[in-house]
Image (cartoon, rainbow, N blue to C red):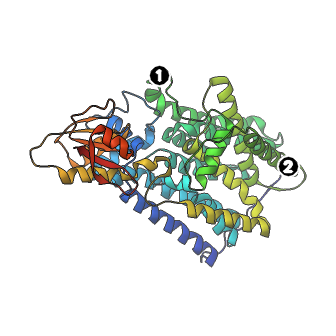
């Protein structure tokens, strides 16, 4: 296998294309800091904190939930201990992931394109996706997992292009991949696929010169450390796994693909009519691209990044199908397939070598930028008014009163978070299970006027996105 070298990075003085790319990353990072500080806490963020991370109830080593992402949760625990409880402190580890991911994208695009317009397009394509952007600030493990995976991917690229891959590159791949998987277990598939493709590409390139030595290097410096680190970090949490733990996902490839496409445009996921050809066409297309690149590599030098990306995507997809068929695992749905967006968008960069393809990528970037929201997270749109509801409740509280609150399903998690954040010890009960008259306040995400009348409620506050705080008439 012949590997071509990337475009040179250019002089020390940053040319205008690289300066614009850096400016784009700085602006998007600033946007994520703003969102982390201003957006209401979401149900999933609140649930993880209230039941597992809260220093007063720390339960990461006692219980396990797929909603809690272990390494990320440990960082959240440290952040809250250091800075106190707030939306921003809860989201600081995700902002760390954002900085790591953006820096990895910068390294990849600068090394691949140098001082060219395609560098700007590549940076936008890999960072401005609304689904990726949401997880650069929301307190979940997906953004941190993606950042560590992107750095593992970059280390893999360096290892493949080096004349003699040093052990440090293989060890970097192992450590970064293991940390990615422990940040969020969904990254087990792409990190394992990445290491498999790296091993195969290095084996092909060695042409039998030193197969035994190469095999030892791969086992001792990449595969072995990855397995050990994942086991050491995750053995206690995973020992608490029970039946039906991994419940979130798609039942079909069609739904998996549809969720990623819809949310990449800034819309909510809405399941459409079954059409299995969508997923099949995408998989066949990636397989065809990989086959073409592999054939080219036998005849002339091939770009290592393209082959590594297409190969990792295909092996990951095969692993997901096998996991679904053999183990009954769900297919990725929206955020649980965020790594497919990274690999898919990175695979699409090759069409930018043609002017028409570059125009298409620019239009795609514009569409994705238009889909980014600054007032809500698209997967938790109903949660956008949660902070305002809590503040409206606080503004109506009379000193010395004990208050009972009924909420919509799952809204109770956010209220419990704000109860801790604002010290609302006067809330004596929060219930979301069985409605019955007698509560002092009722918090609802949405409800019809007739239902308010039926329950005998009078709204006293309506949030910007329709959530209601009501009291008995």
Q: Is 420 on the left or on the right of 111, as rendered?
A: left
Q: Secondary structure at mark 2?
A: helix
Q: Residues within 10 Å of mark 2 (few under 14, many from 20)?
A: few
Q: Which residue is depicted at the point 32% across and 38% down?
A: 454
Name the residue tied to disc 1: 242
Q: Which residue is depicted at the point 50% across and 53% down?
A: 134
Disc marking residue 203: none
Q: Secondary structure at mark 1?
A: loop
Image label count: 2
Report x, y in % for residue 453: 31, 42
Residue 16, above or below 428: below
**Contact (Cβ within 8 Å) of mark 2 with mark 1:** no
Residue 86 visible in the current orientation: no
N-terminal of the pair, mark 2 or mark 1, is 1
Q: Which residue is depicted at the point 36% across and 58% down?
A: 37
Name the residue tied to disc 2: 292
| Identity of the residue furthest to the top in this view | 243
Residue 84, above or below 251: below
Q: Residues within 10 Å of mark 1 (few under 14, many from 20)?
A: few
Q: Which residue is depicted at the point 69% across and 32% down?
A: 321
- Answer with the quarter of the image where residue 68 lies: top left
Give the spatial CA distance, label 2 vs label 1. Answer: 44 Å
Q: Is 30 on the left or on the right of 227, as rendered?
A: left
């Amino acid at each position: 296998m012949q590997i071509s070298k990337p475009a040179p990075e250019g002089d020390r003085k940053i040319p205008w294309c690289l300066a614009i790319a850096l400016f784009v990353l700085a602006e998007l990072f600033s946007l994520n800091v703003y969102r982390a500080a201003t957006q209401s806490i979401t149900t999933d963020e609140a649930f993880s904190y209230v039941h597992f991370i809260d220093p007063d109830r720390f339960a990461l080593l006692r219980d396990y939930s797929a909603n809690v992402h272990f390494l990320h949760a440990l960082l959240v625990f440290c952040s809250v201990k250091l800075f106190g409880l707030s939306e921003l402190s809860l989201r600081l580890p995700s902002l760390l992931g954002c900085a790591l991911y953006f820096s990895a994208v910068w390294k990849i695009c600068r090394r691949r394109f140098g001082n060219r317009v395609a560098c700007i397009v590549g940076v936008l394509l890999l960072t401005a996706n609304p689904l990726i952007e949401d997880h650069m600030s929301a307190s979940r493990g997906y953004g941190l997992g993606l950042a560590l995976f992107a750095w593992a991917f970059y280390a893999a690229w360096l290892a493949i292009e080096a004349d003699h891959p040093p052990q440090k590159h293989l060890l970097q791949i192992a450590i970064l991949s293991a940390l990615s998987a422990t940040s969020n277990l969904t990254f087990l598939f792409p990190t394992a696929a990445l290491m498999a493709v790296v091993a195969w590409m290095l084996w092909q390139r060695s042409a039998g010169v030193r197969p035994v030595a190469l095999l030892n290097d791969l086992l001792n410096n990449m595969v072995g450390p990855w397995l050990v680190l994942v086991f050491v970090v995750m053995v206690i949490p995973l020992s608490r796994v029970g039946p039906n733990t991994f419940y979130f996902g798609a039942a079909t490839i069609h739904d998996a693909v549809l969720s990623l496409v819809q949310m990449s445009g800034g819309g909510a996921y809405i399941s459409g009519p079954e059409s299995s050809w969508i997923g099949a066409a995408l998989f066949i297309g990636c397989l065809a691209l990989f086959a073409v690149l592999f054939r080219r590599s036998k005849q002339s030098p091939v770009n290592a990044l393209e082959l590594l990306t297409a190969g990792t995507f295909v092996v990951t997809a095969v692993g997901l199908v096998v996991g679904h068929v053999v183990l009954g695992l769900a297919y990725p749905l929206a955020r649980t397939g965020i790594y497919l967006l990274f690999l898919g968008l990175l695979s699409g960069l090759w069409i930018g070598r043609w002017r028409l393809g570059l125009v298409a990528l620019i239009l795609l970037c514009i569409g994705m930028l238009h889909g980014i929201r600054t007032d809500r997270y698209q997967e938790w749109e109903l949660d956008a008014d949660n902070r305002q509801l809590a503040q409206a409740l606080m503004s109506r509280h009379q000193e010395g009163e004990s208050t009972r609150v009924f909420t919509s399903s799952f809204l109770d998690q956010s209220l419990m978070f704000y109860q801790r954040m604002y010290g609302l010890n006067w809330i004596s009960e929060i219930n979301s299970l069985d409605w019955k008259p007698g509560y002092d306040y009722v918090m609802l995400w949405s409800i019809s006027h007739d239902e308010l009348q039926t329950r005998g409620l009078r709204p006293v506050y309506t949030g910007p996105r329709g959530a209601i705080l009501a009291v008995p008439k």
